[in-house]
Amino acid sequence: MRFLYKVFNNYGVAIIFFTLISKFILLPLSIWVQKNSIKMVKMEPDINHIKINYFGDKDRIADEQAKLFKKEKYNAFASLIPLLIQIILLVGLVEVINHPLTYILKYDSNVTSKMVSIAVAKNNLEKDSSSLEIAVVKDIKNHQNLADYEKIIDTKNIEKLNLKFMGLDLSIVASIELGIALLVPILAGLSSLLLCIAQNRINVLQKEQSNSNKYGMLIFSVGLSLYLGFFVPAGVALYWVFSNLFAIIQQWLLNIFINPKNYINYEELEKTNQELKELNDISKQNKLTREEKLKSKEDYKRFFKVVNKHLVFYSESNGFYKYYKGFIEYILENTNIIIHYITSDYHDNIFNLAKENNRIRAYYIDDKRLITLMMKMDADVVVMTMPDLDNYHIKRSYLRKDINYIMVQHAMDSMNMTLRNKAINAYDTIYVIGKDQYEEAIAIDKLFGIKQNIVKCGYPLLDEMIDEYKKNKKENKQKQILIAPSWQKDNIIDLCLDEILNKLKGKDYQIIVRPHPQHVRHAKDKFIKMQEEYKDNKNIIIETDFSKNDTVFNADILITDWSSISLEYAFVTKKPVVFIDTPMKVMNPEYKKIDIEPINIWIRNKIGKLLSLKEIKNIDKEIDEILKNYKKYQKGIEKITKESVYNIGSSSEVGGDYIISAIEEKIKERKSGKNEK
């Protein structure tokens, strides 16, 4: 500062050049920080993958992240070094500006002390004030107490000391002077605001931060700048302003010469950011009561206290037990295996069954804990109906690689068309209901080069429904119409439910609207509102309890779109179905890669009547006609049922035996030492 002041003889210019030179001197450090920041963002996809793969497992995430940092030789604290140096420079500059006699004019400390003593005595100043040397300069420039100072030293050099820049005295402090001096903290705050905005857009690391971090840092930086500008000499604020402006220019130049786009895969970064966001959204979407949180926490701990678990079932909600019921009852009857049953439904009926049978251990696990629990799973066999294992938030266990994951179908329709692409690929075993699903499973294995155990199981739920229907079959005094759509976009409820109800409610029918369980789960309020709307109409019922199938059995005719309930209904009751031709339910846009026509398409005109959206205006007449011709449909439906479904009447035994043998195989492997974890 002393050298620069001698060169320019202008305090403000000296401060600006001091700021610029400090940036040049620290350039190697800035380059290192730029490269370190690029390295951090380059690692972000890998870090996201770690957070996704071990979601909720904070200890494992920390361990894996530390390994990654070590491998990449990344220093997480590098970004703090420039900040520390900035603070040191700032503190040093405050000292220099507050002591111009000592550092700029280089007076002896004894001489300086004597002049400071005069300023204190004559101006009634505090002896410990940080700006006493500035007070001396002001006295001499204003020719105050000049005779006293001249007894100590020739004051001409002090009178020549130029502490101004563009008319502003750089020695003033805004909190003392007020007036025009208040411009100082405002300029400091504005420069800090510009820097933050620029950093959020062009700094390789900062622009990847969350909005809360960005705006949090902006508020902190601007607030700190306003505070500093208010309480430090204007010269320090001038340094702060130009330091911020030079930092923007420096970052722009660094991005040109060390372009982050040459090192970072931004496409992969965006993809993993989105995956992680979806996981976080899932973990937050369901608001739990205090009781639900407590039970989930306790059951999570209880689940992991059990060692050597052989068999685990997972249920998304209360209505899913019916898909497992036949297998579970067969296993309980023929083995001593303990069944661990995980559910995401706090009110699942499984808890009542667990009270009645001590070999069923039921656990309520909320959506967030479920992600972690599944990744830490330790069991021989895990049975699920959930597709997309390993594709989204529910992953295979990373603790145990030899688990036999069995996928049980919860619908009789096409796996290839109505499930997402690769939805079943992560499973070890696929239970198929009939020949259509079997052929699809074989083709999927061939297409993706995987090898799965494909079990010709059949459909225990269908067996149970057939038995129950035979026992409870009855003729309705009032004809019942069941409306049971799928839950994909543009289903009957979304497109034409009101029109159908308006056409039929004048008839002497009892109409039951039974939405898909997933539709209710994701739009619960919608159906509560619908129940309220039709509560006074005795002929219209909005049903959201899926634990029983009475309405399916008792209905005289079913109206649906692409829901698989059409197959269950037709194969059980041998009654026809009215299909509303809504946009086709295609979850896998690549389904045509397999040259097998989905059962959802070819069967529609064989078990009922297909109506376009325009033909809904005649739906009442079509239904009247169909109800008169039951026998016309019955024979054809019976034939298709036998051809399309495996092991009718014995599917529970087939599926249960496979599970038992799979567990026995794992036990033998462990005993022989072949089991790898």
Image (cartoon, rainbow, N blue to C red):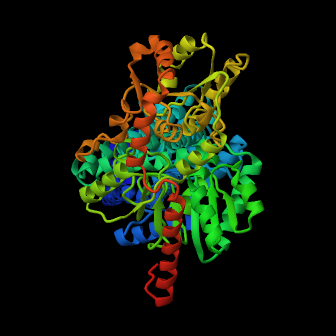
Say how many tags the image has. 0
Judge whether residue 18 can be spotted in this image.
no
Q: Where 193 falls versus 593 (above or below)?
A: above
- Tell me if 444 is positioned left or right of 570 in this view: left
Q: Residue 6 vs residue 362: left or right?
A: left
Q: Which residue shows up at 31% across the image and 46% down it?
A: 250
Q: Quadrant of residue 294?
A: bottom right
Between 224 and 43, the residue placed more toward the observer is 43
Which residue occupies 26% across, 49% down?
Answer: 261
The residue positioned 32% from the left and 46% from the top of the image is: 251
Note whether 299 is above or below 391 in the view shown.
Answer: below
**Front residue of 512 and 351:** 512
User: Residue at 66% across / 40% down in the picture?
Assistant: 472
Q: Position of 127 compared to 444: left or right?
A: right
Q: Position of residue 440 (x, y in %)?
A: 32, 51
Residue at the bottom extreme of this rendering: 672
Q: Nearer the viewer, residue 594 or 203?
A: 594
Q: Nearer the viewer, residue 144 or 82?
A: 82
Let me know if residue 64 appears in the view: yes
Q: Residue 566, position in %: x, y? A: 47, 35
Rendering coords of residue 57 (x, y %): 55, 63
Give the answer, above or below, for where 233 lies relative to 365. Answer: above
Picture coordinates of residue 89 (x, y %)? 46, 55
